[in-house]
């Protein structure tokens, strides 16, 4: 049987989400077909965690030794949200070792991980995005000019990051600098986005050499001011409706745009793309090339709503990448 490494952890605040996704991925990979090995990657250590024991990873070939036997990883399922699993670093490492993995390659990962770069790039292909401004740590910016350009309220986000860490909805001009400094704790770049009022939805999909599926769309109704970290990971704070309560033509358009974005970026594996619908216009929020995979995450919900077997989907992705 193939040895599958479920890669989790990471170097950012999203490690706590990654740990939950690891549990989901473990259950989604068919244990009758594959040997599953959770592998933790942090700044302090790389290790396989098997039967409550830790086995150091040999970074020369991404193997580990257990009971005197060397275990080589045949496929890496990356479920690190944030660096180094979502920004292209691990993808490049695995490519150099010729180990197939579950996500897109270096270029697509690095572009999609940078929200400002990704949205600006896709805007050139006709994808609608909110107006935004990028600021970098250590470089002066004019908060009043930003407000004049984008208006209030506006969203302040780490440019590289996810799970809503470091995000603030700024209602008053005097709070913008504070919000930017908060976002800088998660990223050296901060994106300030125009606020768009509407219905938030998310669409998952995957493609292989022989098959593709664009999943039913999920509507996200946050009971908080916006879909923040608490709302994302507290069931009582959010209502997730699959399929979304939107017109068929809007649904079809979102699924079509999602498929187009997947191809433009050169994505692989399962991807989730977030949007907001305002006055029947569809605005891209962000592209997630390593989406959450907890039992209650959007993707498992959407796969179930599509009538698909999640273990078969994961097996298909593993086998396709291994060709």
Image: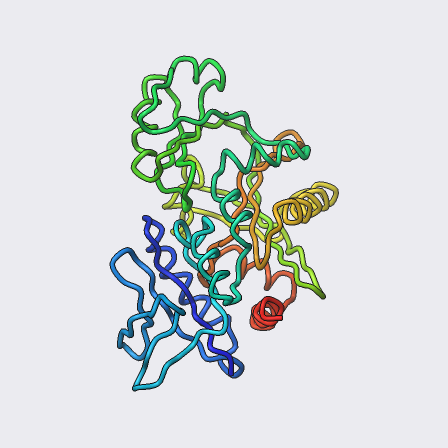
Q: Nearer the viewer, residue 187 or 29?
A: 187
Task: Classify 278 as above or below 257.
Answer: above
| Residue at 52% over, 45% down | 220
Task: Tell me: 25 left or right of 43.
Answer: right
Task: Classify 154 as above or below 95.
Answer: above
| Residue at 31% over, 26% down | 138
Residue farthest to the right, as pictured: 249
| Residue at 56% over, 53% down | 271
Task: Classify 99 as above or below 109.
Answer: below
Q: Nearer the viewer, residue 319 or 206?
A: 319
Q: Nearer the viewer, residue 209 or 144?
A: 209
Looking at the rendered structure, the number of numbered marks drawn on it comes to 0
Give coordinates of residue 155: x percent, y percent: 43, 29
Task: Classify 212 as above or below 127.
Answer: below
Quadrant of image for the C terminus: bottom right
Colour style of the rendered protein structure: rainbow
Residue farthest to the bottom, as pictured: 68
Q: Nearer the viewer, residue 141 or 212?
A: 141
In the figure, residue 42 lies in which quadrant? bottom left
Give coordinates of residue 156: x percent, y percent: 40, 30
In the figure, residue 140 lies in which quadrant? top left
Task: Tell me: 295 left or right of 280.
Answer: left
Task: Tell me: 187 left or right of 2.
Answer: left
Give coordinates of residue 298: x percent, y percent: 52, 55
| Residue at 62% over, 32% down | 123
Give coordinates of residue 101: x percent, y percent: 51, 64
């Amino acid at each position: 049987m193939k040895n599958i490494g479920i890669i989790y952890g990471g170097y950012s605040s999203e490690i706590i989400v990654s740990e939950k996704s690891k549990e989901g991925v473990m259950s989604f990979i068919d244990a009758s077909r594959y040997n599953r090995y959770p592998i933790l990657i942090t700044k302090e250590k790389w290790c396989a965690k098997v039967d409550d024991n830790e086995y150091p990873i040999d970074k020369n070939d991404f193997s580990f030794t257990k009971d005197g036997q060397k275990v080589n990883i045949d496929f890496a399922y990356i479920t690190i949200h944030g660096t180094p699993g979502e920004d292209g670093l691990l993808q490049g490492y695995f490519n150099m070792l010729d180990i197939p993995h579950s996500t897109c390659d270096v270029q697509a990962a690095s572009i999609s991980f940078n929200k400002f770069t990704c949205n600006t790039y896709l805007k050139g292909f006709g994808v609608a995005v909110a107006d935004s401004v990028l600021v970098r740590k250590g470089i002066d910016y004019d908060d009043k000019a930003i407000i004049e350009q984008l208006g209030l309220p506006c969203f302040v986000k780490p440019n590289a990051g996810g799970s809503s860490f470091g995000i603030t909805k700024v209602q008053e001009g005097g709070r913008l600098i504070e919000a930017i400094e908060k976002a800088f704790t998660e990223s050296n770049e901060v994106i300030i986005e125009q606020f768009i009022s509407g219905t938030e939805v998310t669409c998952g999909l995957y493609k292989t050499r022989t098959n593709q599926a664009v999943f039913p769309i999920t509507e996200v109704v946050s009971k908080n001011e916006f879909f923040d970290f608490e709302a994302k990971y507290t069931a009582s704070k959010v209502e997730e409706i699959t399929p979304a309560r939107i017109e068929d033509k809007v649904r079809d358009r979102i699924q079509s745009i999602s498929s187009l974005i997947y191809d433009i970026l050169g994505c692989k594996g399962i991807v989730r793309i977030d949007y907001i619908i305002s006055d029947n216009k569809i605005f891209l929020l962000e592209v997630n090339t390593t989406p959450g995979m907890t039992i209650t995450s959007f993707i498992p919900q959407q796969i179930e709503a599509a009538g698909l077997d999640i273990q078969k989907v994961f097996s298909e992705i593993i086998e396709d990448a291994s060709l």
